[in-house]
């Protein structure tokens, strides 16, 4: 095939992909250069044409979350109704991913808590946390040498014989990335993990002890799994030690 023909085919393919993206209001609304009102307008138009478009509905809800605290009663009522619909669609879908269901639960929990419905919010969030904790465990299934969790007699890095033990020291760190969904909502906060720093200096058996949601728990785990430590020492020998790690997510 001649070079000119190849270039022409590549350009056609690129044009086709761009056209598909432009025809997809959800993909277009996720692009950061567009201002908030234009993105929301695109999604509302898409939902007017197809009220069951769950991806458009989820993206709209995440964008509306940015303005919830400053919104009036009508705006808050709209968002509450929208996130309730999102949860209903996710629960009814036979192919819904666990992370998508967790996000719908989290959005409903945050809205209800803001509206003063604390008991309902706690129940919804508890369901979401169970899903996130399970996803965190599934991320570690294939890690070689993963141990059963030996932290029963340790309190966040302070074993009963702590005088004989020196703490692990972090020597390599990777900052966690933001999830797309949390970025759309401009969501911020802290994830806390309990981690076993093994004798080889690798973090293992990460457990979620404070969930933030919107995909940030998983991003925290992805980062910490790449960290490396000088292991704790007990009587001059490497010693497995558990610790609590907090990762703060902040948008600049």
Image: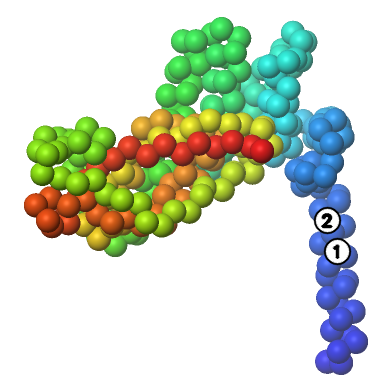
Residue 122 at x, y = what percent?
A: 45, 17
Residue 67 at x, y = what percent?
A: 73, 22
Which residue occupies 61% across, 18% down?
A: 111
Quarter of the picture containing the N terminus is bottom right
> Looking at the rendering, which quadrant does residue 187 occupy?
top right
Q: Which residue is mark 1?
A: 16
Residue 59 at x, y = what percent?
A: 71, 36
On screen, 77 above or below 197?
above
Which residue occupies 48% across, 21% down?
A: 124
Residue 141 at x, y = what percent?
A: 34, 54
Q: Which residue is mark 2?
A: 20
Callout 2: few (<14), some (14-19), or many (20+) C-alpha neighbours within 10 Å? few
In this rendering, would 116 be left or right of 11? left
Mark 1 secondary-structure assignment: helix
Which residue occupies 58% across, 31% down?
A: 188
Which residue occupies 24% across, 39% down?
A: 157
Q: In this orientation, does residue 73 appear?
A: yes
The answer to whether the residue labelled 1 contacts the one labelled 2, judged by CB atoms less than 8 Å apart, is yes
């Amino acid at each position: 095939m001649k070079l000119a023909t190849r270039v022409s085919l590549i350009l056609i393919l690129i044009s086709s992909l761009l056209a598909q993206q432009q025809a997809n209001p959800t993909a277009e609304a996720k692009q950061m250069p567009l201002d908030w009102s234009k993105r929301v307008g695109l999604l509302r138009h898409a939902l007017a044409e197809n009220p069951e478009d769950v991806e458009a509905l989820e993206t709209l809800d995440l964008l509306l979350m940015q303005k919830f605290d400053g919104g009036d009663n009508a705006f808050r009522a709209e968002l509450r109704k929208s996130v309730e619909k999102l949860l209903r669609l996710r629960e009814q879908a036979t192919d819904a991913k666990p992370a998508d269901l967790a996000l719908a639960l989290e959005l409903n929990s945050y809205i209800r808590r803001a509206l003063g419905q604390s008991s309902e919010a706690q129940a919804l969030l508890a369901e979401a946390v169970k899903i996130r904790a399970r996803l965190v465990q599934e991320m570690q299934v294939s890690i070689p040498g993963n141990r059963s969790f030996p932290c029963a007699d340790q309190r966040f890095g302070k074993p009963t014989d702590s005088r004989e033990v020196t703490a692990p020291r972090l020597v390599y760190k990777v900052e966690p990335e933001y999830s797309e969904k949390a970025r759309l909502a401009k969501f911020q906060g802290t994830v806390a993990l309990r981690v076993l720093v093994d004798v080889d200096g690798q973090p293992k058996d990460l457990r979620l002890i404070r969930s933030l949601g919107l995909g940030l728990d998983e991003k925290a785990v992805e980062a910490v799994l790449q960290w490396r430590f000088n292991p704790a020492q007990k009587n001059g020998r490497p010693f497995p030690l558990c610790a609590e790690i907090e990762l703060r997510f902040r948008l600049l």
